[in-house]
Image: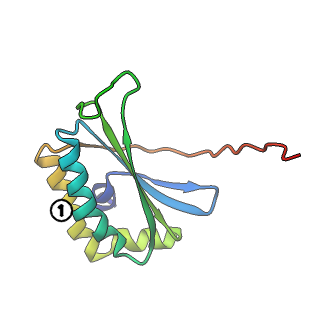
Amino acid sequence: MALALILYSIFFMMVGGFMYKTIAVYSHIQDLNEFEVFYTSEVIPRILDFDEVKHIRFTTLIPTDKVASQSEEVSVLIETYYHSAEALRSVLDSEDSKEITKYFLYIQESGMARIESFLGNESVFDSFLDES
């Protein structure tokens, strides 16, 4: 289980009772461009190689009081969506995930970014507009 937390430095989350995802928040990013190039060219392709993974969302979070997007206060939110709870468990328990863990350790140990870990529960609120 410790490997699972290290692997994505994240938590399990169930959305709407049917969708499972892991979330990582990277903060104190030294160079946003370098981080994005590394993550999208090295890490994401490896994760997407798993049949159990549906897709990954990469979101850059810029504080509302900041104009420049290169600030160390910029964070990145990575959401990885899985087909099922079993799919998520299969990925976390796989030998390939141990190799991917090395990328997360490198990001942390090199000072490229700090990986934040959270436990949480997501609620989704939809708008129901009258279409008449």
Q: Name the outermost residue toward the right.
A: 132
Give residue 2's position: percent from left, percent from top.
Answer: 30, 58
Task: Tell me which amino acid carries mark 1.
Answer: Lys
**Secondary structure state at the residue bearing disc 1:** helix
- Would you place residue 67 above or below residue 98 in this image? above
Q: Nearer the viewer, residue 2 or 120?
A: 120
Q: Mark 1 — residue? A: 102
Give residue 129's position: percent from left, percent from top.
Answer: 79, 43
Give residue 121's position: percent from left, percent from top.
Answer: 54, 45
Q: Is residue 103 left or right of residue 45?
A: left
Q: Name the outermost residue toward the top.
A: 65
Which residue appears at 23% of the width and 35% of the height? 28
Displayed quadrant of residue 56 = bottom left
Give residue 117's position: percent from left, percent from top.
Answer: 34, 44
Q: Name the outermost residue toward the left.
A: 110
Displayed quadrant of residue 125 = top right
Which residue appears at 49% of the width and 73% of the height? 86
